Amino acid sequence: MGLQIGNIISRRELQLSELKGKVVAVDAFNALYQFLSSIRQPDGTPLMDSKQRVTSHLSGLFYRNLALMQEGIKLIYVFDGEYHELKGKTHEIRQEARDVAREKYEDALESGDIEGMGRYSRGFIRLNSEMIAESKELLHAMGIAVVQAPGEGEMQCAELVKEGKAYAVASQDYDALAVGGLRLIQNLTLARKRKTAAGFIYIAPELIEYERVLNELGLDGDQLICLAILVGTDFNPGGVKGIGPKKALALVIQKKYPVEIFKAVEERLDFNWQEIFEIFKRPNVSKEDVLFPKFDAEKIKNILVNEHDFSEERVSNQIAKLGEAKKQNSQSTLF
């Protein structure tokens, strides 16, 4: 769900070459759910090994991250820690949506509707502890740093950027902006092409810059948090009834101060805005020393080929491509 402010903020298309030599902090759960949702058979069945264990997330982590690494990009994957109790309502809404999607999938299965099966199967995916553990193991073998956040992973990503340990946050959500993350990149871990009814379209990474957002909207950091709360966050899904992004922006500009902003809508509030404001103002993050492990080709092959039945030829070819890319990058740096 996240913040619903995408239609009032500007962004620009980003060339991967602009990220060469830079470190990007990836919202791990956001990326893993992308992989589980998109890397599937036409009927919605996820990729599986011979033991019927789902491997869609491992495929995404390996192939898409290697493509980014070949561009000279260093990656940190940040995993969520404990959820705040205020996210309970959001989890309830998500579970209800999963239940509806599962029912529609079963109806499509019964009627032999392959397209419907593919569409609805994406609605009830779950990320379990086993998937998380094996994802961390594969990332470590790939030389990608892994950080365990105490709370929200995306907020920890933003903290790494503010500390100068990463250049940008990679996520499809906007929460990193509300906590002052300087740069947010969307579509970075998505497949570059997406199939539509009209054919394939190109999905470009997009860069959103915090200071530019504030300047264009005419807001400061506290006002951006107020805007987020008005339109709805994971801590108050739905926001204030009857207020969309444009109305919220006008209200924030008019009233300016948090107390005055929420006083103007106090009759419609069914949540404690101060408590949510504090979550964004003082997020539950830690100061992390980021360690990049050594790339271990044999361990990668053991995880993917021996444990999960990936093609040894394809895995070896991709590893070889990364080696060539690193050699070329080092030579271009040298000269």
Image (tube, rainbow, N blue to C red):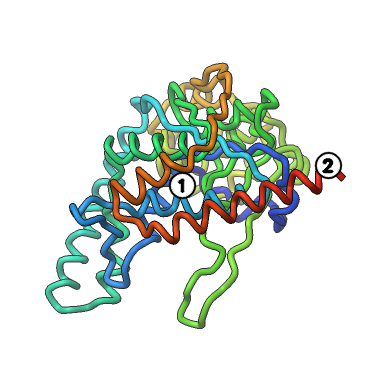
Can residue 88 be seen from the camera position used here?
yes
Q: Residue at x 49, y 55 (%)?
A: 63
Q: Residue at x 53, y 76 (%)?
A: 200
Residue 313 location (% of width, % of height): 43, 60
In the rendered image, the quadrant that contains the C terminus is top right
The disc labelled 2 sits on which kind of residue? Leu
The disc labelled 1 sits on which kind of residue? Ala
In the displayed structure, does residue 7 sit left or right of residue 190?
right
In the displayed structure, does residue 199 sit left or right of residue 117?
right
Q: Nearer the viewer, mark 2 or mark 1?
A: 2
Residue 18 location (% of width, % of height): 75, 50
Residue 233 location (% of width, % of height): 46, 39
264 and 41: which one is in front? 41
Q: Compared to 69, does 109 lie above or below?
A: below
The residue tagged with tag 2: helix, strand or loop? helix
The alpha-carbon separation of the residues under discs 2 and 1 comes to 33 Å
Q: Which residue is mark 1?
A: 31
Residue 16 location (% of width, % of height): 69, 54
Q: Residue at x 50, y 36 (%)?
A: 77
Q: Which residue is mark 2?
A: 334
In the displayed structure, does residue 203 sit left or right of residue 58?
right
- Furthest residue toward bottom: 198
